[in-house]
Image (cartoon, rainbow, N blue to C red):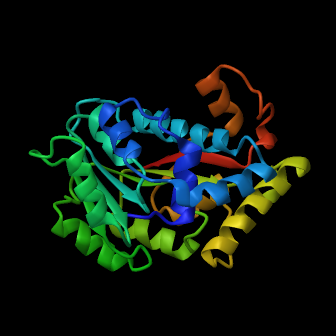
Amino acid sequence: MKLSSTSALVLLWAGQDCYRSEWARNFLGRLNLEEGRPLYEKCAAICPYYDQVIKNRKFGVFHLIEQAFSDRNGHYQVIIAGAGLDALGIEVTERYPNVKVFELDRENMGWKFNLYGETGDISKPKIFFIETDLLTPSSVYKSLVVHGWDSMKETLMIFEGISYYLPAEILRKLVRVVRPDWAIVEFLKQNDKIDADKAVIPKKIFDVISNECGLSHIKRYSGSELEKYCADMSVSDTCSMKFLEMARTGANRYFPAEDSGWIEVCLLAK
């Protein structure tokens, strides 16, 4: 199967070193990402270290999952909105043996299930690939229930690489119908929170991606805005690029100050 150029682009940026489990690495190793190479090169001309942004954000998601799941062996549920062909859900099931994962996207979930089955044992399914339209939250809820999600059990909902493209009202409705106990949202900061010399980078990068996808608007957030859209939840922790780069690599080569990063990852909790 040929991936879209934008899907392949993000996977090229992330690479396999964000993942510990052999299953996740094997899955990613079977994907042909060449469709994203021209877009990757175009973005590299704008920012040669953009892969570090994606690696940092992925590190941040796992860091905040650990904060939410105080009991590693707890029977939690994870919903990943806009999961695409990333291996996040696979990695989560490997790190947390009793967790069930529900991946949501509008296409390719059947194909992803088949590829997932080729890379490991699926005799006891812990991950469910659901084709559904995030722009119709009521259908998302019904699809989750059909696939075994239990609204009475503790649930973490993850929005990684998707908040910029979703209308804010859809984000609000998705959180309202699912009512998760925690939400991890990776988001693009407001321009006034980014150093002027750095702010041009995400603008150019997202212009390239928007032109490729035919998108007309990219949504930015702040922590306080997210609290407005995530009913009954408040920000528990926020990870800046400065923090994430130091925690992941032990140095601040690209993001020496809080305003030198344009993306943050935040944990909201009830």
In front: 248, or 150?
248
Outermost residue, right side: 197
Q: How many marks?
A: 0
Quarter of the image with the N terminus in it: bottom left
Residue 200 at least partly seen:
yes
Q: Position of residue 60 (x, y in %)?
A: 54, 38
- The answer to whether residue 154 is left or right of residue 182 is left
Query: Considering only vertical position in the picture, is 4 above or below 135?
Result: above
Residue 218 at least partly seen:
no
Q: Position of residue 250 (x, y in %)?
A: 65, 19
- The answer to whether residue 42 is left or right of residue 158 is right
Outermost residue, top side: 250
Q: Residue at x 66, y 54 (%)?
A: 40
Q: Position of residue 116 (x, y in %)?
A: 26, 50
Query: Considering only vertical position in the picture, is 190 above or below 132?
Result: above
Q: Position of residue 120 (x, y in %)?
A: 21, 41
In front: 30, or 172?
30
Query: Considering only vertical position in the picture, is 151 above or below 50?
Result: below
Outermost residue, left side: 123
Q: Residue at x 54, y 55 (%)?
A: 34
- The answer to whether residue 60 is left or right of residue 101 is right
Q: Residue at x 70, y 53 (%)?
A: 41
